[in-house]
Image (cartoon, rainbow, N blue to C red):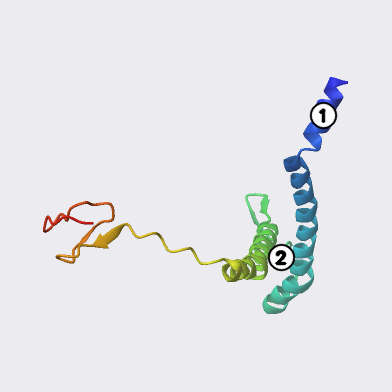
Amino acid sequence: MGLLKGFRDFVLRGNVVDMAVGLVIGASFGAVVNALVKDLLMPLVAAIFKAPDFSAMSFKMNGSAFMYGDFLNALIAFLIVAAAIFFFVVTPLNALTAKLKKPAAPAAPTTKKCPECLSEIHKDAKRCAFCASPLA
């Protein structure tokens, strides 16, 4: 029974559950981003280059076929996904966090002015380092 209780405690720990929720949401978000790229952005690339798919592009050298079109497809899809995430997720979230962020409290002063010579001295000083006058 102790082994099952230990497993249950492990599974129900907060970080395991949080990670599972994050993975599920991440997978769903990945599907949304892939749909955005496949259904909206790739047709735009196809309209610009007049070819919806580059996978047929290849060349042969000494009997070996180099299928660089597949690489181009993967590279373009990666760049579009990265751009979509950056412009539609990262940039708006950074702007939102910047708006919601509270300004930092000003730091407590570490110096004070000497009443005699008006020099900047440490706030805990008992004598001025410049004019040697005693401080209250």
Residues marked 2 and 1 touching at CB (< 8 Å): no
Q: Position of residue 111 (x, y in %)?
A: 28, 59
Look at 74% across and 45% down and name the residue there: 19
Q: Residues within 10 Å of mark 1 (few under 14, many from 20)?
A: few
Look at discs 2 and 1 and give the one toward the viewer: 1
Q: Which amino acid is tagged 2?
A: Phe
The residue carrying mark 2 is 54
Q: From the image, which quarter does the C terminus lie in?
A: bottom left
| Quarter of the figure with residue 60 | bottom right
How many numbered markers are drawn? 2
**62, above or below 107, in the image:** above
Could one spot residue 125 in this view of the protein?
yes
Depth check: give the residue in front, 48 or 101.
Answer: 101
Q: Nearer the viewer, residue 124 or 11?
A: 124
**Element carrying mark 2:** loop
As helix, strand or loop, the secondary structure at mark 1 comes to helix
Which residue is at the far left? 131
Residue type of the residue flagged with mark 1: Phe
Q: Residue at x 35, y 60 (%)?
A: 109
Q: Which residue is mark 1?
A: 7
Q: Answer above or below: position of 81 versus 40.
A: above
Farthest residue in the front direction? Answer: 136
Residue 65 is situated, as x and y percent measured from the top left of the image, at 68, 53
